[in-house]
Image (cartoon, helix red, strand yellow):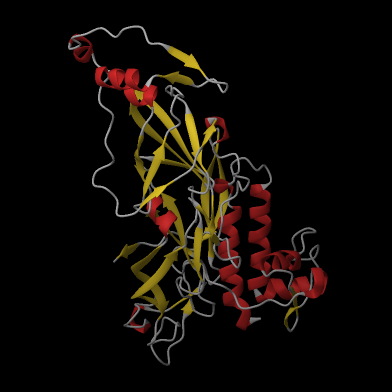
Amino acid sequence: MSYLLGDIKRAYRKKAMELHPDKNPNDETAAQKFQELAEAYEVLVDPESREAYDSFGSDGPGGMGGVDPDDIFAELFGGMRFGPGGPMPGGPGGRKRGPRKGESSTIPYDVTLEDLYNGKEAHFNIEKGVVCAVCKGSGGRPNTKPKPCSKCDGKGITVIQRSMGRGQVGLSQVICPDCSGEGMKFRDKDRCKKCKGEKTVKEKKRVDIYIEKGMTDKQKIVLHGEGDQEPDAEPGDLIFVLNQEKHPNFERAGSDLMTTVHITLSEALLGFSRILITHLDGRGIHVDSEQGRILKTGDAIVVRGEGMPTHKHPDQKGDLYIRFEVDMPSEDWIRGLDVKACALGASLDSSGLILIDTRVLQSLEQLLPPKKPDVSPRPEIVDEVEYEKASIEDFGANDEDSDHWTDDDGSDEDGPNMECRPQ
């Protein structure tokens, strides 16, 4: 059993933090589960209690009144049972326990909508814990051994008083602060000079990640084995969580994009032919409006295939919705009119479009405020696009995936945050 003591203590510390009543205020059974875990731990780590349990069971001296420590052990170690010779396969399917894995570290990373549209490679200098090369993770100097912790008598847990409310005080078991729950510790003079008895040291390393086209807000990029190292455990993972920054011009819903374009009253009445927007990759989007159709504030058009790339399928794109805002002329323009517009001889065609004589249009154009020019500076690449009349309610209708992606299906586990500095 001695060679498993460290594993039992580490597993107990992790489970105790998970079941602690303070972390589960809404669970009425949390205190009972925490107490059962602590009692089972005492049986498993104390040789005399273990011997009594092996001889008389959970109802015998030193037992737990019907709660089987082996059940607790199986819960801690993923189905393994504890026998006289050590761990044995048990539980569903008789699975054998693999190497313990260290905790993963999570790093939030802010990205722009341009990054998610075009893709981006990012470089980071991180500081992570690695097993001390001098003591090989033991925490002590050569030829020294740890001693039982004097504060917890080698059990890894201590008992403290805890307020229960209404003037009542109860006892609660917590991880020993002196030995961090391990039950053993080196004397000050026996500690490793390199790691000061901590078993790990900090090391700087450069890591690279690639933000693929079409990735989404809160998506995770998992680097396996790049997290903090711990003795006798596989390294944890390093998980980057993408946080999309708010864009000043575009709004995203799934693979669709939406933007608002301001047009003049002249453009709303007479149409336009210009570059409306500069896209996320720097291309200009040129639109020829349908002459004779009047645009009002809130009207929208859709350009198919000009939305966000689909993750893992960047050639497939969503749609781009363009919503119009009509800028009305100011009072100064009204005061500056020297002539009054005469009645226009207008008619409607079969589709309902207004037909106005070219000469009248030219006269009206001279009366109205000037149309807006192309965007400046002019993009090097300009695409002439086709569009359709649209309802803004359709924006984001093809966003069927409500869950966040994870770029690696091997892990979706969050761990403690790790600080890093992008290069």
Residue 384 percent location from the top left of the image: 41, 46
Nearest the viewer among 201 and 73 is 201
Q: Is residue 89 left or right of 249 when viewed as pictured?
A: right
Nearest the viewer among 188 and 117 is 117
What residue appears at the point 63 percent right and 60 percent down from the top-left corner?
A: 38
Residue 335 percent location from the top left of the image: 19, 9
What residue appears at the point 73 percent right and 66 percent down from the top-left corner?
A: 69
Which quadrant does the C terminus fall into?
bottom left
Q: Can residue 111 be seen in this view?
A: no
What residue appears at the point 75 percent right and 81 percent down from the top-left corner?
A: 84
Q: Is residue 195 left or right of 103 when viewed as pictured?
A: left
Which quadrant does the N terminus fall into?
bottom right
Nearest the viewer among 280 and 200 is 280
Residue 226 percent location from the top left of the image: 46, 73
The quadrant in which residue 372 appears is top left
Residue 100 percent location from the top left of the image: 59, 74
The quadrant in which residue 364 appears is top left
Q: How many labels does the image show?
A: 0
Q: Is residue 358 visible?
A: yes
Reply above or below: 411 against 90.
Answer: above
